[in-house]
Amino acid sequence: MDFARMVICLLYFTKPDFVYSGNTIGSRQSYTNSSSTGDPEFTQPIGNLTTPVGREAVLSCVVDNLGKHRVGWLRAEDQTVLSLHTSLVTHNPRISLTHDRQQGLWQLHIRQVKPSDGGCYMCQVNTRVMKKLVGCIDVHVSPDIVYEETSGDVAVLEGDNATLVCQATGHPRPRLMWKREDGAPILLRRSLREATPVVYYHSRTQPFPIPLAVFLGTYLCIASNDIPPAVSKRITLHVNFAPAITVPNQLLGAPLGTDVLLECHVEAFPATITYWLRNRSDMLLSGGQKFWMNEKKIEYKVVMRMIIHDFEESDIGTYNCVATNSLGRSEGTLRLYGLAENTNRIDRLPEESSTSSSSSSSAISDVTISILALAVGFLVIR
């Protein structure tokens, strides 16, 4: 830099003069073809370039009637001298010069452009009244996720606050968009009772002020700025909650001799231990000829299935599906009865209950007959 300034000073005291200017960004520039005056003139603007990072940028300065005058390139922002006429001053190996004296074309080449190369450059001619043109390079950079400032996987208790944060760099400034990896809509809570489903959510943060189980899942933060490629970051939100069980069919009837399917749906996180009970006491085990059990897990949901082979009267009763994790326990109840060939319901009841039912039926019949007799007598009297 000091060497460059010394060279400029030496040139300043030779004829024709080289005039070194200060920061000229924003100053008025003129370019007209006035070769009749004998002074050099710029015949066209340098223009502004938009260049993706890694490409080559070429700034062109066209000077008419240059004569014995000289052309120089400078970095406008910090006044760094890059070249003096046909000689490079900068030691940057990515910068080179080309020129065509006949066409008056002087070009500054910057190979493998970096973001730091962005800014304005000045073409100067050493006339007595310094003449200059400025052209700028806008370096476009594809997005990149700032992992140090972006959330990792998050785990919270149901009802606690949670916020996913995503940061990205790039030029132009990247747009950030959230979506669920499974394609399901994102639920934006508006209040305790209201949520709005959206497929995409544009924001640097994804707030979950009142996380519920439905928010659990993997989210993608996608950064894009029209400079390929777009990038994304996977963030999983774990909402820890006690098991909850729903039973699609709580009362089941099946013909004797058939196979019967029992099913329960479990939602819980972290993962649960699940098992089946009969009459709330006897734990049933899979693997024998009588019972076949299976589980299907998708994220925080589990579908419990049990098949009772060759259903018989001794299988009639109550069955429980049970799920437990570190936060609690839940169970569902299914009642199973048999169907005879004539589709009448078969319930296996204790003897005392059967006797009581018979007595009750007889008493009800007697009362019904008495009421009918009174009604007939009343009609006859009238």
Image (tube, helix red, strand yellow):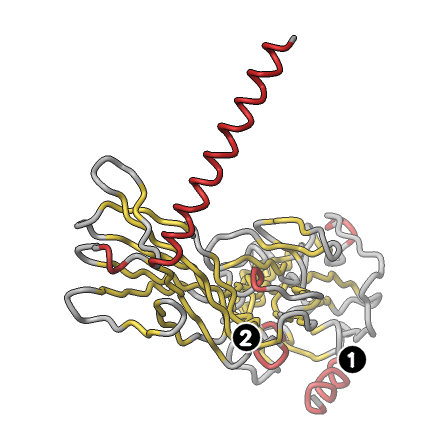
- Residue under label 1, please give it: 12
> 57 or 282: which is nearer to us?
282
Q: In this rendering, is residue 182 above or below 286?
A: above
- In space, the residues marked 2 and 1 are separated at their CA atoms by 25 Å
Towards the viewer: 284 or 58: 284
Task: Identify the secondary structure beneath mark 1.
Answer: helix
Q: Residue 178: x percent and y percent?
A: 58, 59
* Disc ID at residue 95: 2
Horizontal side of 240 relative to 192 (left or right) equals left
- Which residue is at a point 63% across and 78% down the rendered structure image? 149
Residue 56 visible in the displayed image: no
Q: Where is residue 123 in the image (x, y as percent from the top left)?
A: 70, 66
At 65% from the left and 76% from the top, the residue drawn is: 84
Residue type, numbered disc 1: Tyr
Q: Is residue 227 above or below residue 53?
A: above
Upstream in sequence: badge 2 or badge 1: 1
Q: Which of 200 and 315 is in front in this view?
A: 315
* Residue found at x 60% / y 72%: 115
Amino acid on which disc 2 is placed:
Ile
Point out which mark residue 285 bears: none
Q: In which quarter of the image is the N terminus?
A: bottom right
Neighbour tally class for label 2: few under 14, some 14-19, many 20 plus, Cα within 10 Å: some
Q: Residue at x 47, y 40 (%)?
A: 363
Q: Which quarter of the figure is the C terminus placed in?
A: top right
Residue 201 can be seen, yes or no? yes
- At mark 2, the secondary structure is strand
Please give left or right for residue 369 compared with residue 321 in the image: right
- x, y percent for residue 249: 41, 50
